[in-house]
Amino acid sequence: MNALPESSSHRASAVLSLLEGLYPDARTELEFKSPFELLVATVLSAQATDKSVNAATPALFSKYPTAFELAQASPEDVEPLIKTIGLYRNKAKNLVGLAIRLVERHGGQVPNDFDAVTALPGAGRKTANVVLSNAFGVAAIAVDTHVGRLSRRLGLSEHTNPDKVERDLQRLFPSERWTFLHHALILHGRRVCLARKPLCGECLIASVCPRIGVA
Ligand code: SF4
């Protein structure tokens, strides 16, 4: 089943140990007080920065604190509150749609169930992994652009398909560190292993990085 070379396992252990030293408190940077707020924030964060989402959500959650209030809104009601976030029209439509579905099928609560979350409008595999791991403590690896890029540069996966990267990482790392791992990779991708110009000279995991694909 595992097509990754044995050296990947050794490198994975070394990478994990260095990341644990660098980012011991790695966690999501999205601000939330309930699974519902985390779900909404995660849907909003697609192709947007956590900072822009965190700037918009206090007013949004003040007006729509639960799925019940949001399910009564129209997308046009929601749009002004999230218009500083990319793709806001589509996201407003999805948020109202997911709130209606939560009320109709899940008693207004976010389900602790992968398939049920991915069935919500605007919520894919990445959203489900973020919500389940951060709100319910389920072991999961959400593969976003940073996690995918770093996995390839570090030789932990050869794939560009996020689902395949997720499977490679699941094979290489112990499940109890999956949630930590994706947060730490995201932080390292934002601060050091930048998409266009990775700061390899300042990188504290460079000693174990083959820098695959880096010029
Ligand atoms: S050495 Fe360079 S490519 Fe490897 S993780 Fe560090 S910044 Fe990224």
Image: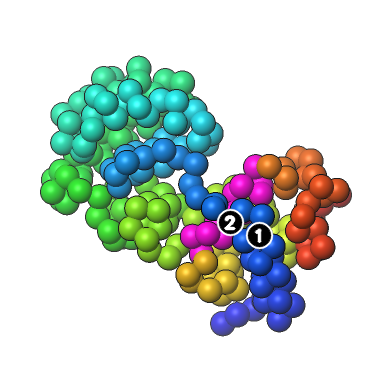
What range is drawn magenta here? Answer: 178-190
Give the vertical position of 29 relative to 82 (above or below). below
Identify which residue is drawn at 71% across, 70% down: 14
Q: Secondary structure at mark 2?
A: loop
Q: Nearer the viewer, residue 90 or 26?
A: 26
Residue 93: in magenta span? no
Q: Are marks 1 and 2 in contact (CB under 8 Å)?
A: yes
Q: Main secondary structure of the magenta part?
A: helix
Q: Residues within 10 Å of mark 2 (few under 14, many from 20)?
A: few
Residue 179: in magenta span? yes
Q: Residues within 10 Å of mark 1 (few under 14, many from 20)?
A: few
Identify which residue is drawn at 37% across, 61% down: 137
Q: Nearer the viewer, residue 35 or 125?
A: 35
The residue wearing badge 2 is 24
Q: Which disc, if any, is residue 66?
A: none
- What is the basis of the colouring in this image? rainbow
Cβ(mark 2) to ligand 1 < 8 Å? Answer: no
* Residue type for callout 2: Pro
Judge from the rendering whether residue 26 lies leftward or rightward of residue 137; answer left or right.
right
Q: Can the viewer see residue 5?
A: no
* Residue type for callout 1: Gly
Q: Residue furthest top?
A: 80
Give the vertical position of 156 relative to 126 (above or below). below
Q: Can the viewer see residue 169?
A: yes
The residue wearing badge 1 is 21
**What is the C-alpha distance between the residues marked 1 and 2?**
6 Å
Identify which residue is drawn at 42% across, 20% down: 83
Identify which residue is drawn at 59% across, 49% down: 186
Residue 171's spot in the image, x, y percent?
56, 74
Q: Nearer the viewer, residue 135 or 79?
A: 135
Q: Secondary structure at mark 1?
A: helix
